[in-house]
Image: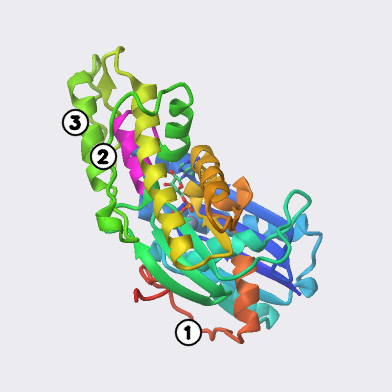
Amino acid sequence: MNVLAIETSCDETAAAVVADGRDVRSTVVWSQLADHQRYGGVVPELAARAHLTAIGPVVRDALSGADAEWDDIGAVAVTNRPGLSGALLVGVNAAKGIALARNLPLVGVHHIEGHIAANWLIDELQDYGEIAMPAVCLIVSGGHTDLIRMSAPGEYELLGTTLDDAAGEAFDKGARLLGLGYPGGPAIQHAAETGDPAAIPFPRAWLNDSFDFSFSGLKTALLRLVEPYRVEPVDTPEPVREPYAAHVPPTFRSDMPVADLAAGFQEAIVDVLVGKTMAAARACNARTVILAGGVAANARLRAAMETAVAEHDHSPRLISPRLTYCTDNAAMIGAAAHWAIQRGDIAGFDLDVFARESLTRKG
Ligand code: KG4
Ligand code: ZN
């Protein structure tokens, strides 16, 4: 069955047609990056308005990209939790309109379940076949850092979560402190390529070997390290009268070791993510280690995770989504919707949005 999936939880307007939860017939992602970049982060009101403009064309593109007519679609799925409320509402209302007009079942999807389900997608470049359970999933995105034990699709137990910033948020804030722009993850990865990760020591929060995370100390350490290199900008920009203050990037002396700072900062995040994921895999006797979320696109994280899995006593299989399915997209929502449909989890027209909701409760 073809599912038309819609994702508008943050700053990507996305739609996709996915067959049987696995086969991506089309995927369209309209990034609002240009709208938010000058503010140094996502402005929720702008995101909601940009989704409104983009949603119609994006859905039409997804249908035509799949060579599909409305009659070829068997259900409509949409992210309804968690995310920016105004942004989620646009996708949910579009999905309700389509479901009503076409008399289609409506499915509400949890964004994090979507990120996990991205690993089940197949296309000409990737097919993991059967994925053995139990699995330990590391979900690392702009809003989440969760370690989850998965015993089957739909069955999740939260092992640990972040006590402060999410891993992607740490990358974004770190890049902001270094004056590297938004989004921070790709910017730090790029700057770190020529750096020495061991040149400058950064703290790692192991938190008594629990499965929880904390990245705020790392951010403070970076702030202290860049402060001595800070200089006043030569041209102070004129204040602009506009509803949202534009972000003015900091300026630094030219001898600041940007590459070493970026490499050391990235390594500290990656070390803790890999260390705790491997400890969880051991504790759960995991047969598979699953990476998911925007930070799963990080090249250093993927490489370090591969090495750690190869050295692990039980050698679980490591799987991670294709780069295009790590960051927000609607194909992953189509994959998770398939599981929801199999569970009989069909929504009514009272489907609501929730800014915060965990996939599991802790414990
Ligand atoms: O999953 P995602 O697209 O959106 C959320 O659900 O939050 O994740 C976005 C996050 C951003 O914080 C971004 O900086 C980070 O993923 N990210 C990366 C990389 N690409 C995206 N972080 C590290 N390295 C990357 N290559
Ligand atoms: Zn996401």
Q: Can residue 180 be seen?
A: no
Q: What is the number of the mark on residue 203?
A: 2
The span picked out in magenta is 169-181
| Disc 3 within 8 angstroms of ligand 1 (CB) | no
Circle 1 packing at 10 Å, graded few (<14), some (14-19), many (20+), is few
Callout 2 secondary element: loop
Can you identify the residue that label 1 sits on? Answer: 350
Q: Of tags 1 and 3, which is closer to the observer?
A: 3
Can you identify the residue that label 3 sits on? Answer: 224
Real-space Cα separation, disc 1 to disc 3, in angstroms? 49 Å
Real-space Cα separation, disc 2 to disc 3, in angstroms? 12 Å
Q: Amino acid at mark 2?
A: Pro
Q: Can you give x and y, in whole percent of width and height, for residue 116 in the image?
A: 55, 63
User: N-terminal of the two: label 1 or label 2?
Assistant: 2
**Vertical side of 65 occupied by 150: above or below:** below
Q: Amino acid at mark 1?
A: Asp
Real-space Cα separation, disc 1 to disc 2, in angstroms? 47 Å
Q: Can you give x and y, in whole percent of width and height, for residue 187 in the image?
A: 44, 32
